[in-house]
Amino acid sequence: MGKLNPLLAATALTAVAVLAVGCGNDDSDAPDTGRKRPVRPSTSSARTPAPDRAEHIPGETVTNAPVLPDGEVVAQAVNASGNRELEVEGGLKSGPLAVLVNCKGEGKLTVEVKPVGLSFPLKCVAGEVSSTYNQLDLKSTHEQGTVSVTAQASVHWAITVGH
């Protein structure tokens, strides 16, 4: 076998490093279904694992509807529990569709937007409000749309859906 050229080896290592840094999970063509509202700064240790539930945002409640950052509210419910289906006023328009959910009580809540197929779970805990914000960019308009929430009776929740 021949000798390894140091310049060639350094170039190969640089190419591998650039590729590794450039690799990520950002698929810009995929709908953005996991945005959360701004998170308050954390004072916990960097070694503490992230919770497997949505963020607790001080001031959020299930007795008032979550506030839509901008746009028009098309469906809303407050202080609900158990399962419920909400009709989206005016159907689902193309463009951004935002879903904000708060829940409180031990259990899991699942939100599904029909007929577009957006579905996400939210782990709820007793004693504090868990919150999440999801946004989907709809490519086409649907004359009708519904938002279904499935939750145990022990979980209280509030939701706002908007365009």
Image (spheres, helix red, strand yellow):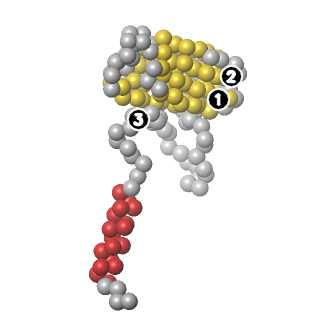
Give the mark nearer the N terminus: 3 vs 1. 3
Q: Is residue 93 left or right of residue 88?
A: left
Give the mark nearer the N terminus: 3 vs 2. 3
63 or 151: nearer the viewer: 151
- Which residue is found at the position 52% from the left and 13% from the top? 86
Amino acid type of the residue that numbered disc 2 sits on in the rendered structure: Gln
As drawn, the residue found furthest toward the bottom would be 2
Tell me whether circle 2 and circle 1 mark residues in contact (CB < 8 Å): yes
Residue 43: give x, y in percent of width and height.
55, 48
| Viewer can see residue 95 | yes
Residue 84: give x, y in percent of width and height.
59, 14
Q: Measure the C-alpha gap from mark 3 to mark 2.
A: 27 Å
As drawn, the residue found furthest toward the front would be 1
Please determine whether, in this image, residue 72 is positioned above or below residue 139. above
Residue under pointer 1: 108
Residue under pointer 2: 152
Amino acid type of the residue that numbered disc 1 sits on in the rendered structure: Lys
Amino acid type of the residue that numbered disc 3 sits on in the rendered structure: Asp
Task: Return the mark for residue 5.
Answer: none
Q: Residues within 10 Å of mark 3 (few under 14, many from 20)?
A: few
Q: Measure the C-alpha gap from mark 3 to mark 1.
A: 22 Å
Residue 46: give x, y in percent of width and height.
56, 54
Q: Measure the C-alpha gap from mark 2 to mark 1.
A: 7 Å
Task: Return the mark for residue 32.
Answer: 3
37 or 117: nearer the viewer: 117
* Quadrant for the N terminus in the image: bottom left
- Quadrant of residue 62 in the image? top right
| Viewer can see residue 58 | no
